[in-house]
Amino acid sequence: MLNYIKSEFYRNINTKGNYIFLFGFMAFACFLNIVLGIFANNDASFRYGSTNFSFSSFYTSMGAIMIICLPFVLLICGQEFKHSTLKNSISYGISRSQIYFSKFFVEIVIGTINLVLISASYIISAYIMLEDSGILHFNYLIRAIVACIPLFLVGVILAHCLYFILENEISVWTTWIILMIVVPKILSMLGRKIVAFDKIASCMPINIMSTYTYHKGSVSVFMSWNNQDVFIKCFIVGIIGTIIFYTLGLVLFKKRDIK
């Protein structure tokens, strides 16, 4: 299995799409702060030219950022079925369990590197272009990123699971959006009337990411994971969700016919 993991890293290191994905998002992250900086320099009354607003905009958008899990997993393993390389790997004696785990391991490593680099580019560009609002807002941002890592992991493993058990990418994207976005939002609406649904909805990754308090008259936003219990919940949800979708995907992948 170690050789297969090495080959996966080598393949991804030499895949142009991965670099387009990474540098594209890094450039976009910098662009957002550059735009704020330009407006702030040209208009003294512009109230959003600070790291406070920039950082809070970042971590209140974690739910939207979750969507990048889909194209990211596509880059790592989505092309395997199109080019029959997965079938060739199995015919060479590599077990499905090894393939499934190896690709997931590569996704974790590359995904972590991407998250660090994209976040770093956003933070650095914010400090260069915007007024420094103090260390407090930087700490909030770091805490938000740490809290969301296990929730992003759920999004990645669900996409990973779906790519290995469904026939085409449209089905993967549709199913992922329904499970990760549509169902949690429906449960949230039902939760306004039924307590049981509200408790379930509060454990959905997208809902945890989207829960925050906005202070009127300021640009201060306080996310739910500033609460220690919710911060711990992020890791519990991440671990349970990862185990469930990893196991489900592996079991169904072993039963799937590879064409």
Image: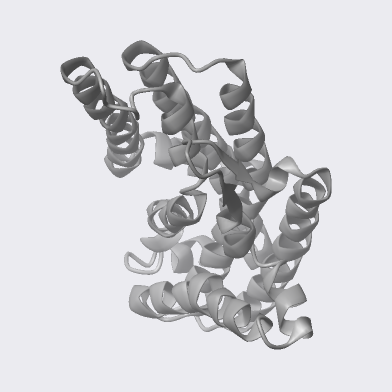
Could you say which is closer to the camera, residue 168 or residue 124? 124
Q: Residue at x 77, y 74 (%)?
A: 199
Residue 250 occupies quadrant: bottom right
Position above or below: 77 against 16: below
Could you say which is closer to the camera, residue 90 or residue 252? 252
Could you say which is closer to the camera, residue 165 or residue 30? 30
Place of residue 48 in the rendered image (x, y in percent of width and height, measured from the top left): 34, 30
Q: What is the quadrant of the C terminus in the image?
A: bottom left
Q: How many marks?
A: 0
- Residue lying farthest to the front in this orientation: 217
Asked if residue 144 can be seen in this view, the reply is yes
Q: How is the image coloured?
A: one colour
Q: Residue at x 46, y 69 (%)?
A: 87
Position above or below: 2 against 132: below
Place of residue 135 in the rendered image (x, y in percent of width and height, measured from the top left): 60, 16
Q: Is 227 positioned to the left or the right of 46 in the image?
A: right
Position above or below: 150 against 191: above
Position above or below: 259 against 126: below
Residue 35 occupies quadrant: top left
Q: Residue at x 33, y 40 (%)?
A: 15
Place of residue 221 in the rendered image (x, y in percent of width and height, measured from the top left): 55, 41
Asked if residue 93 can be seen in this view, the reply is no
Q: Is 161 positioned to the left or the right of 242 in the image?
A: left
Q: Residue at x 75, y 60 (%)?
A: 237
Could you say which is closer to the camera, residue 255 or residue 165? 165
